[in-house]
Image: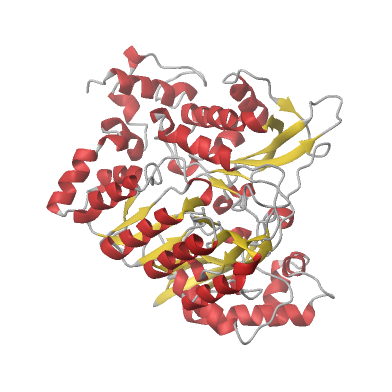
Amino acid sequence: MEFTAEQKQVLERIFAEGFASGQRAAGSVIPAAEITDAHVGDLCKEERWKLEEHGLDIWEKLARHASANEFPKEADTFRFKYHGLFYVAPAEDAFLLRLRIPGCRLNSAQAKVIAEISEKWGSGLVDVTTRGNFQIRKIQPKNILHVLTKLADAGLTSKGSGADNIRNITASPTSGFDPNELVDVMPYALALHHYILNNRELYGLPRKFNVSFDNGGAISVAVDTNDIGFVPLKIQGDASIPDGIYFRVLLAGITGHRHFARDAGILVRADDAVTLAVAMIKIFIAHGDRTNRKKARLVYLIEKWGIPKFLDETQNQLSFPLIFATAEKYPANVNKLPHGHVGVFKQRGAAMNYVGVAVPVGRLTGAQLSGLAALADEYGQNELRLTVWQNVLLPHIGDKDLPRLTKGLSALNLSHQSSAIAGGVVACTGNTGCKYAGANTKDTALAAIAHLRNRIALDRPVNIHFTGCAHSCAQHYAGDIGLMGVPISGGEGFNITLGGGMDQAQGIGREVFWKVPREEVPARIEKIFLAYQAKRAGGESFVDFTRRHDVKTLQEIFS
């Protein structure tokens, strides 16, 4: 096999850590002249597919499949994800489209286009994801070019939203108007988004990669679950560090593997954050494992190297010095308002509000999304924000317009009010649209909400996360209650995890029950909450209650 010059350059980077077969010291680089077929055999199949054809270079192939109305074979199924198209058979014989909504912000005209795409070429439903993004299901091959060009015409894109790429860049949904924020992080999220879109070298990572910017405000953006997370703090009057806004840097979160992002022990000036993120991503591209998909996330590179070496390699990419500073001396505030994404809240500035609209399990009809866009036009400033909690914010609503806005929400069968339970229920796509999922997450979550609505009244908010598989797109280990779908004899079931949390309640939950039949889940959650209410100490939170008992005791209490 004869490699092109570009392929040889890629392989040189891949083998920089000695992944090639043969005896080489760790960290050595294989010269291009020595690259042979034997080296390719060490790569996982996805890496070989990337060498054969880059996922960004398949527009003609997309056109051929659209013309023939045919779904792709295995290798092209992987490449289609570079354009946000996921062939989800056997769950559905259709594509799922995942967009990129940078910073979780879009305008009302764009929201109407997304609703139109769903109604014209999809299922008529639009899902808000746990990365403050949108997904549309049931798209047929013949329509994929219609969808992609319609997105482009509206200033939207799905490029790089799947496969081994950097996922949607998230930012606190109240960026720019949160009265408690330290810094408006929207410019940084947008800058990184456009840097990725315009730099081919930032595609084709060893595995997916998540980046998030927290503004220090009220609503959690789940920053501690990301590969790179930025949390702001203000320094003033310190003799060793100039006054200004800085970010603490968190590294290597992947809650599906039971890892939260760890503090890296550094600060970065806010205006240098994007440059730092790109440098770290490039280190991962060069040195991440491309032979074992199960070890191809940033957390495993850092486990291998340690944070000091990772920071040394990062420093080599930068023109400014890293600022080493402990979290103990320079802490960032990670306290968030539980369920602060649902309800009416004051904005910075006089007589203005943002309204968090409850969207059960993140699912909207096209008509509801169009209706929300129309409300944003009439009472706001033509803008919508999405949250990682799968709901929608309508910002810039005047005090006098609140009654008419809430009436408009009711007409859409939506509300800004939610219970202490329903406001914190999130669910991934599940087995109706994902081939990896072991159970129907969204319908089970909706059944649980309906079952608990008139049976349980909690005085403190809780989060319940329904995820379909061990990939944990809904971050079940980080919920007060987390449920992971599993196949069981004769049907579908869930393993139940208790005591997880993010931000100020950060912690990985522990599995307490296994293979609970799907139809028994609502009643089991009811039993858990009733026992908690009966046995807690005073106003003890659910997470504190569960964490002070071992698993055996929890099984006895909640059975």
Which of the pair 547/134 is nearer the observer?
134
Give the farthest residue toward the front.
400
- Residue 441 in the image: x percent, y percent? 46, 69
227, above or below 375, in the image: above
- Relative height, residue 425 to residue 505 (above, below): below
Q: Is residue 233 above or below residue 442?
A: above
Residue 456 x %, y %: 66, 83
Q: Quadrant of residue 31?
A: top left
- Residue at 16%, 55% in the rendered image: 69
Position in image of residue 383 (x %, y %): 51, 55
Q: Image check: 283 left or right of 92?
A: right
Q: Is residue 237 left or right of residue 314?
A: right
497 on left or right of 283: right
Regarding residue 205, the answer to whether it shows in the image is no
Q: Nearer the viewer, residue 416 or 36?
A: 416
Q: In the rendered view, does 70 fall on the left or right side of 461?
A: left
Q: Residue at x 60, y 62 (%)?
A: 397
Question: For residue 116, what is the image quadrant?
Answer: bottom left
Colour treatment of the image: secondary structure
Q: Nearer the viewer, residue 81 or 299?
A: 81
Quarter of the view holding residue 497 = bottom right
- Residue 342 visible to an observer of this rendering: yes
Q: Is residue 86 above or below residue 160?
A: below
* Residue at image point 80% right, 71% down: 540
In this view, which residue lies farthest toward the bottom?
A: 454
Task: Return the residue nearer the eye: 389 or 42.
Answer: 389
